[in-house]
Image (spheres, grey):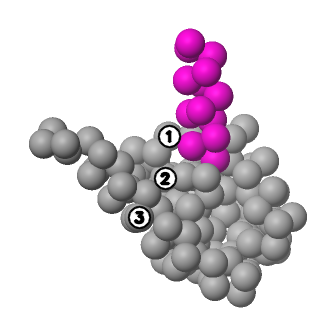
Amino acid sequence: MEEDYKKWLTQLRKGYIELCTLMSLDKHKQLNGASLLKILKDVELIITEGTLYPLLNRMEQNGLLRSSWQIPNGSGHPKKEYEMTNKAKTLLPKFIVTYKQYQNSLEQLTKKDQ
């Protein structure tokens, strides 16, 4: 039973983290992975680099993100910055509406008077 729960949780987290990633990029326009990890951590969505970077790569392959290397002036290492594509900007409002509809359905199903 625990294995079934873990599989379900993995699928739920993938979609949810993708939605939160797009929402973060919509707000901040452009972010590197470390900044994105911090933003998600600040809202108590703790994920590892091993989860985030494959997700970012998959989102880029699916045409939702584009990336570019930013080289800092002076010292420091180049950082890969991510931003939403027009496709993602078009889809994000639909994702949010769908998420809210699912959340509403769940709340209705869990009401005690039913």
Sequence-wise first label, 3 or 2 = 2
Query: Which quadrant would residue 113 be assigned to in this image?
Result: top left
Query: Alpha carbon of mark 2 to alpha carbon of mark 1: how far?
Result: 6 Å
Query: Alpha carbon of mark 1 to alpha carbon of mark 3: how far?
Result: 24 Å
Residue 50 visible somewhere in the drawing: yes
The disc at residue 101 is 3
93 displayed left or right of 4 = left
Residue 111 screen position, x and y as percent:
20, 44
Residue 4 among those drawn in magenta: yes
Residue 33 among those drawn in magenta: no
Query: Helix, strand, or loop for circle 1?
Result: loop
Residue 63 screen position, x and y as percent:
81, 73
Q: What residue type is labelled 2?
A: Leu
Mostly what secondary structure, the magenta segment?
helix
Question: In front here: 53 or 6?
Answer: 6
Query: Which quadrant would residue 1 be assigned to in this image?
Result: top right
Residue 82 screen position, x and y as percent:
71, 70
**Magenta segment:** 1-14
Q: Which amino acid does label 3 sit on?
A: Gln
- Residue under numbered circle 2: 40
The disc at residue 2 is none
Q: Which residue is drawn at 52% across and 60% down?
A: 20
In the rendered image, the vertical position of residue 36 relative to residue 85, given as above or below:
above
The residue furthest top is 1
Question: In front here: 112 or 98?
Answer: 112
Sequence-wise first label, 2 or 1 = 2
In the rendered image, the vertical position of residue 67 relative to residue 32, given as above or below:
below
- Residue under numbered circle 1: 46
Q: Residues within 10 Å of mark 1 (few under 14, many from 20)?
A: few
